[in-house]
Image (cartoon, helix red, strand yellow):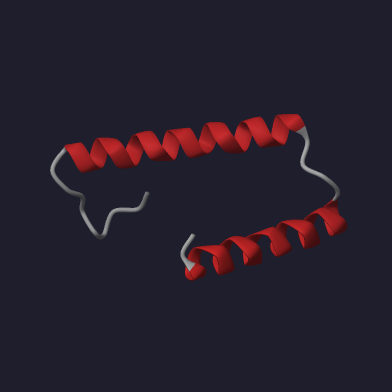
């Protein structure tokens, strides 16, 4: 695993730990909603990629 990737992952895990300490653990419903949103974003990015590019000024 590249060092940069490991460092970034470790920093994200630290952030998750801090947020869970402050706000409690993520519920199954919250996790499912986040994963669904990520799937929607991935589908939108794939659609734009296969459509031949994107407009840099367009919001996601």
User: Horizontal and vertical percent for residue 60?
Assistant: 37, 49
Give the answer, above or below, for where 2 lies relative to 45: below
Give the answer, above or below, for where 59 lies relative to 2: above
**Based on the displayed image, in which of its 4 quarters is residue 10 positioned?**
bottom right
User: Horizontal and vertical percent for residue 23?
Assistant: 84, 53
Q: Residue drawn at (29%, 38%), measured in percent from left and top?
A: 46
**Front residue of this view, candidates 41 and 6:** 6
Label count reads 0
**Based on the displayed image, in which of its 4 quarters is residue 29 positioned?**
top right
**Front residue of this view, candidates 38 and 3:** 3
**Front residue of this view, candidates 39 and 60:** 39
Q: Residue drawn at (24%, 41%), measured in percent from left and top?
A: 48
Give the answer, above or below, for where 10 lies relative to 49: below
User: Horizontal and vertical percent for residue 34?
Assistant: 60, 38
**Based on the displayed image, in which of its 4 quarters is residue 32 positioned?**
top right
Left or right of residue 24: residue 54: left
Left or right of residue 14: residue 6: left
């Amino acid at each position: 695993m590249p060092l940069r990737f490991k460092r970034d992952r470790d920093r994200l895990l630290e952030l998750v730990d801090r947020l869970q300490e402050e706000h409690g653990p993520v519920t199954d419903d919250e996790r499912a909603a986040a994963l669904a949103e990520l799937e929607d974003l991935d589908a939108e990015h794939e659609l734009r990629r296969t459509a031949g590019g994107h407009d840099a000024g367009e919001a996601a």
